[in-house]
Amino acid sequence: MRAFESQSPATGSPRSHLQLHPRDNVVVCLRQAQKGESLQVGSGEVLVQETIPPGHKVALESIGIGEPVYKFGYPIGKASANIRPGEHVHVHNLRTDHQIDLEAIATDIPEPFAPLQHSFLGYRRSNGQVGTRNYVAVISNVNCSASVARMVAQQFGEQELRDFPNVDGVISFRHEAGCAMAWDGIRHRMLNDVLGGIARHPNIGGFLLVGLGCEQGTLDHLVSTQRLHQIQGIPSNPATPAENMPAVLSIQSSGGTRQTVARAVNMVREMLPRVNAAQRERVSAAHLTLALECGGSDGYSGITANPALGIASDLLVASGGTAILSETAEIFGAEHLLTRRARTREVAEKLLERIEWWRWYCANYGEEFDSNPSVGNKQGGLTTITEKSLGAVSKGGSAALEAVYEYAQPVGKKGFVVMDTPGFDPASVTGMVAGGANLVAFTTGRGSCFGFKPAPSFKIASNSALFERLPDDMDFNAGKILEGHSLEEVGHELFLQLLDTASGKPTCSERLGIGDEEFVPWLVGPVL
C-alpha cells in the first residue's frame, strides 16, 4: 500500500487510477472514468465498460462467480456475478467471504523502532499524566441529572472565564443511562468505567459529579469502584466513605433543580483558580495517547489518510507514546494483519476472542459484520467490510501489537494497542478518551464534522476535493498524496501538526465549538 507511484512516470500528471498491489485484479479510479475510456495498467490496457465514479473499482480481468477480488494485495470478497474486464466492481457483483486465520498468530513481530525524541507543551498532573487541554467537567451519573449538568456548564461562557485564561472551558458530560440496569451488571460496570475515565482524564483539571439521588448507579458506588477520591488527594477510608467523596451533588438532597444548579455553579467557581494555576510545560511525546478513528470513509481513505496516519502513529510509538486502534467491527476482515504482529499469542487471542464475541452479539440481533459499511461508505467506493477494514487498520501503522483492551479500560501499555469499541464514531471515541486518549486523529473521506471535548479532534481529509469543500471542518489534507507528495512525507507532516495540536493549537472543531454533544457511552445489556 505504500509503494504506489502517485504520478504518471511518463508525463508527471496526476494519475486517473491506481493499482495498489501487483496482485490486484482491480484498480481504483481517482477521477470519474468514462465509458469507452482506456486505462493503462502496466504494459496493458483495459477499456472501461460503464461510467465509474471516483474512488470506485474497475476490473482488470475477467473474474468468475466465486472467484476472489483482490485489492491492497488481499482478497476483499468474491464475485457474486461474472465480471468482465472494465466493469464496475461494487455491491452488485461482490460479496464478503472472509475466513479468520487461526494459524499465523504472533508470527511476524516487528523489530522495535529506533527511538525518537519529540516533545509538546502539556499540562503535567500530580499523578504523572499530562493533559493536552485543561477543562472543568460537570459529570452526570444518570440521565435524570443531565439537564442540571448542562445548566451548570452553560453558566461558564467566555465572559465568565475571562479571568482564567488557562481553563479551556467548563463542559458537561450527559448520557441516557444510569438507572434501569442490574446492580454491578455489565451495563453498570461499563458506564462506571466511562464516567470514571472521564473524571480521571489528564485533560480534566477538576470535576463535579451530579446525580438525582435514587438512581441505581449511585454516586458513592461510582466514587469507590473508580477510586475517584484519590484524584482529589483524599486518603481512602472505607469505614467512612462519605468523608472520601470528591465534589458531588444530589438533586434530591440539595433542594431541587434550581438549588442544585446554584450550589454546583458555586462549587465550579471555587475550582477555577486551582485549575487555572496549571501551566503548560515542555514534556516528552511519550505522554501522548492518540486515539485513531476513521468516519465517513471512502475509496481514498485506505490509500491516503489512513496509511498517512499509520506513519504518524509509528512516529509516536517510536517517541515512546501510545496509539489506540479501535472499532472492532472495522478490524474484522483485516484482523490477520494485527494478529500476525501481536507481541504474544495471548494478545492475538484476546483480539480474536473479541471478534468472536462481536459475531455472537450481532447474530443475537439478526445483524452481521458486513452491514458495517454505511450508505455513504458505499457511495464513496467501499463495498465489503473486508475492503473497509483493510484500509481502516492501516491507521495503526506497522508497530507490534502490544495489548488489547476492553471498552473504556485504562490504557497503561505504551506502544500500539487495540481497544474493543463499536464502529459508531461517538461511542468509539468515548471509549478511547475514557481509556486515557488525550488527542484524537480522525480521518474522513466523506466529511465527518466531528469534535470531542475534552480531547482535541484533528480531522484528516482523504482527498483534496473534500478538504477544499469543507475548509472550516478539515484540519489536514492527505489528498496531496495523490498529487505527487510521498506517503512518508505527508505522514511526517501530519505527526508534527498533531504535536502542535497537543501543544494547544486549536483544531477546526474547537474553533467551531463542536464537541459537547458527542459523548456517547457504549453500554451492553438490557434496559430494565
Image (tube, rainbow, N blue to C red):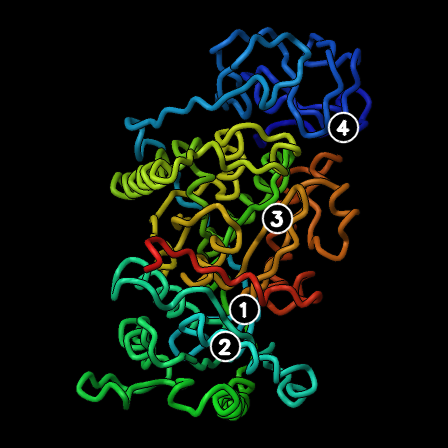
In the rendered image, which quarter contains the C terminus? bottom left
The residue identified by callout 2 is: 137
- Among the two numbered marks 3 and 2 on one chain, the one whose residue lies closer to the N terminus: 2
Q: Amino acid at mark 2?
A: Ala
- Among the two numbered marks 4 and 2 on one chain, the one whose residue lies closer to the N terminus: 4
- Which mark is in front, 3 or 2? 2
- Which mark is in front, 1 or 2? 2
**Depth check: 194 or 396 in front?**
194
The residue identified by callout 3 is: 492
Name the side, left or right, on which 73 lies relative to 189.
right
How far is the residue under mark 3 from the one under mark 1? 25 Å
Q: Amino acid at mark 4?
A: Arg
- Among the two numbered marks 4 and 3 on one chain, the one whose residue lies closer to the N terminus: 4
Residue 300 coordinates in the image, percent (x, y):
65, 35
Name the side, left or right, on which 71 lies relative to 464.
left
The residue identified by callout 1 is: 454
How far is the residue under mark 4 from the one under mark 2? 46 Å
Label 1 residue SS: loop
Identified at 37% across, 44% down, the residue is 401
Q: Amino acid at mark 3?
A: His
